[in-house]
Image: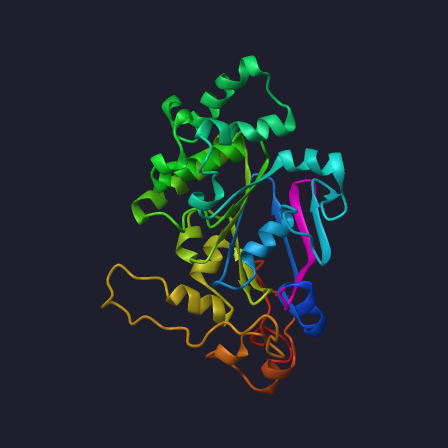
Amino acid sequence: MNDDTLLEVRGLTKYFPAGGDWFAQMFDRRKIKAVDGIDFTIPKGSTLGLVGESGSGKTTTGRVIARLIEPTAGEVRYANKDLAKIRGKELKRMRRSLQMIFQDPSSSLNRRKTAGQIVSEPLRIHRLVSKANLEKRLVEVMKLAGLSRRFLNRYPHEMSGGQRQRVGIARALVVEPEFLICDEPVTALDVSIQAQILNLLMDLQDELHLTYLFIAHDLSVVKHVSDRVAVMYLGKIVETADANTLFADPKHPYTRALLAAIPKPNPKAAKRKVLHGEVPSPIDPPPGCRFHPRCPEIIGEVCRKKEPQSTTLAGGTRVACHLYSDNGA
């Protein structure tokens, strides 16, 4: 782990029982392979965009890193400590440095509490501020999130979607974290509000020297906020590259399909390519390359039978595709 690396993920795996309750699991021993052995690193002060369709395992990855759910296998090294192994007070201290912004502020905020109560809860849990200084700290962090003092006494239903998400951001910032997991933070918002929240997150990163894992299903959302982008499909990372390189010269057929699906300003200028088929079930993923049933560039039996290994290309792009391996050459 390099000195400038804040987060390092190695072989991260998360399987869920396919059966529902314990009785169903007695008869159904299959596993949902939500995350199946992924690797990536995030340097301090940078943003990694994690992109893929629904069901690819992005949100599960974020929740495992945050220790909201336990990993099945692998390592998550944060500041040179394996988050998967720490417990108790040490985990509590680490969670102050690592916070999460959730996708839907309507469901992630307690509707029975005011914004002030919601944002102050992490301070109470970590015992960071005295009662005398509490309001001052709340006003400071609300201002950082773009909200005035008057919002402290408002309930979530009295605010717009963008205002609720700003409260969620304030709640994450109030304990002065170093690393934020942003789980589709603009997906539930109107397009006009999305740009405001994205600009806010970028400004906060510069001002507070934050590091981000930015999870999204839309490549166009992460284009301007990410330094590097990792593309995820059915529990696997299929391509990782510098953001500018990935958008200018995508290598994996799945990445190219996602980019082709981004709406163009002039629809008549170029015909949009449609990615056909659905993401297969993570209970029984296809053999070989998991993308091969939908891949427009399949090259034969090697794609159907042999899982591609990640290959580093000139320029630093890492891609798991037989088009770039000795088997596919």
Q: Residue furthest bottom?
A: 301
Q: Residue at x 42, y 36 (%)?
A: 166
In this rendering, is residue 305 above or below 113? below
In this rendering, is residue 278 above or below 177? below
The colour style of the image is rainbow
Where residue 17 appears, x then y in whole percent?
66, 65
In this rendering, is residue 191 above or below 197? below
Q: Quadrant of residue 210?
A: top right
Q: Is residue 93 magenta?
A: no
**Relative to 177, is 221 on the left or the right?**
left
Q: Magenta part mainly helix, strand or loop?
A: strand
Where residue 240 appears, x then y in whole percent?
56, 59
**Relative to 279, is 274 on the left or the right?**
left
The residue range painted magenta reads: 1-20
Q: Residue at x 47, y 36 (%)?
A: 169
Where residue 81 appears, x then y in whole percent?
74, 42
Q: Is residue 12 magenta?
A: yes
Residue 305 or 321: which is nearer the viewer?
A: 305
Q: Residue at x 41, y 42 (%)?
A: 198
Q: Residue furthest top?
A: 132
